[in-house]
């Protein structure tokens, strides 16, 4: 056997070993997600006997315990879908902008969707689920374009720091505009304030079903963008040299992320920092290959949001803390750590 063939065999073995390790991590995430789903259904502000849990899963609602479990089932489904969407959207945004600080909340995308929904409700008496979703998607897309345009101005183009600053400023401005829109409407102020926190409580299958087609489009488009994001990670010039249409690749991947963010915000409200934390943790497990990173971020986001929801239910029994607060408590220190350790360098 020649030295070249030995080297080729070693690289092949190392690649296979790496893929096996990633496969084990993936299986571990699936197991963790299954365990968290079971925990989400069985744990809450009210103690429920196992017999009532089994009966409720079979469709029975004969007592308070079974009714409590029946309410947790759609809540668990929504937490899985929303967490998966935000985790995947965060990975896509970081890949598209090559910005380690990219996140639907930090870049102002969630707040843009929120402003669009609140404006539609307050000024145009918007009430249908479809209208909520389309308004949120259009608001998310407009905000993303606005932030990227502002962050691209001046010398150096869209650097990570400029994008983060532009997104933070936009989020603050849009948040103030939401307050300005809601203040004159005392009849909707309470519901809007509760929705603005971001959460999955009160979930029903009637609320979840209308958003499923939009999430499906976002998931498919985003996951199919993995190879294009790998090319973009090499730099625009190299990607173009490999035959990649850089602008089209960015636009398509961003389209998927905007659908995920807008649809999730419409049904849950703005939930921040999850799209920042999850992709970074997943990179530690599987590296920077988006063919692995995107599925891992999807599962990791679902796990994190489910865990945050369970913690929010039991931390202050019999009251609850919405997941938007829990993710902010986890994400804010993580954001500071990234800024200090990574020095906001490009991916």
Image (spheres, rainbow, N blue to C red):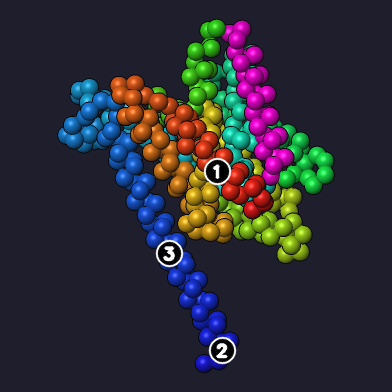
Tag in front: 1 or 2: 1
Q: Which residue is mark 2?
A: 3
Q: Which residues are magenta?
A: 160-185
Which mark is drawn over residue 83?
Answer: none
As drawn, which residue projects farthest toward the bottom?
A: 1
Residue at x 24% of width, y 32% of height: 56
The correct choice, above or below, for 276 with respect to 201 in the image is below
Q: Residues within 10 Å of mark 3 (few under 14, many from 20)?
A: some
317 horizontally vs 211: left or right: left
Residue at x 57% of width, y 40% of height: 336
Which mark is drawn over residue 21?
Answer: 3
**What secondary structure is marked by label 2?**
helix
Q: Which residue is mark 1?
A: 337
**What secondary structure is marked by label 3?**
helix
Query: Is residue 171 magenta-colored?
Result: yes
Query: Is residue 216 magenta-colored?
Result: no
Q: Nearer the viewer, residue 302 or 272?
A: 272
Residue 100, percent from left and from top: 61, 47
**What secondary structure is marked by label 1?**
helix
Q: Earlier in the sequence, mark 1 or mark 3?
A: 3
Q: Residues within 10 Å of mark 1 (few under 14, many from 20)?
A: few
Task: Report the predominant secondary structure element of the magenta stretch.
Answer: helix
The correct choice, above or below, for 307 with respect to 227 in the image is above
The reply to whether residue 219 is in sight is no
Residue at x 52% of width, y 54% of height: 283
Residue at x 67% of width, y 38% of height: 164
Disc 1 versus disc 2: distance between alpha carbons?
A: 44 Å
């Amino acid at each position: 056997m020649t030295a070249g063939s030995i080297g080729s065999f070693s690289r092949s073995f190392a690649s296979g070993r790496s893929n096996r390790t990633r496969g084990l991590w993936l299986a571990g995430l699936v197991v963790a997600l299954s365990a968290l789903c079971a925990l989400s259904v069985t744990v809450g502000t009210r103690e429920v006997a196992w017999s009532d849990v089994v009966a409720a899963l079979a469709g029975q609602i004969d007592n308070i315990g079974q009714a409590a479990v029946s309410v947790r089932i759609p809540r668990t489904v929504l937490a899985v879908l929303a967490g998966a969407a935000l985790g995947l959207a965060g990975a896509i945004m970081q890949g598209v902008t090559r910005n380690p600080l990219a996140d639907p909340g930090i870049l102002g995308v969630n707040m843009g969707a929120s402003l669009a929904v609140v404006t539609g409700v307050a000024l145009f008496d918007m009430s249908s689920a479809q209208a909520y979703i389309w308004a949120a998607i259009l608001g998310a897309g407009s905000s993303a374009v606005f932030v990227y345009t502002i962050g691209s101005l001046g010398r150096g183009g869209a650097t990570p720091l400029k994008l983060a600053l532009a997104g933070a400023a936009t989020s603050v401005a849009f948040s103030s505009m939401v307050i300005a829109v809601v203040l004159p409407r005392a009849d909707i102020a309470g519901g809007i304030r509760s929705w603005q926190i971001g959460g999955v409580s009160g979930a029903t299958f009637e609320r979840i079903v209308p958003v499923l087609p939009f999430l499906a489009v976002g998931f498919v488009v985003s996951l199919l963008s993995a190879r294009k994001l790998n090319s973009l990670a090499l730099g625009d010039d190299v990607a173009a040299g490999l035959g990649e249409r850089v602008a089209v690749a960015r636009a398509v991947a961003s389209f998927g992320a905007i659908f995920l963010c807008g649809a999730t915000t419409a049904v849950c409200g703005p939930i921040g920092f999850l799209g920042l934390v999850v992709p970074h943790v997943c990179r530690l497990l599987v590296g920077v290959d988006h063919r692995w990173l995107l599925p891992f971020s999807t599962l990791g986001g679902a796990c994190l949001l489910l865990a945050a929801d369970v913690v929010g239910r039991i931390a202050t029994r019999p009251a609850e803390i919405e997941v938007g607060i829990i993710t902010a408590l986890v994400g804010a220190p993580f954001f500071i750590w990234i800024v200090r350790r990574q020095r906001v360098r490009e991916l």
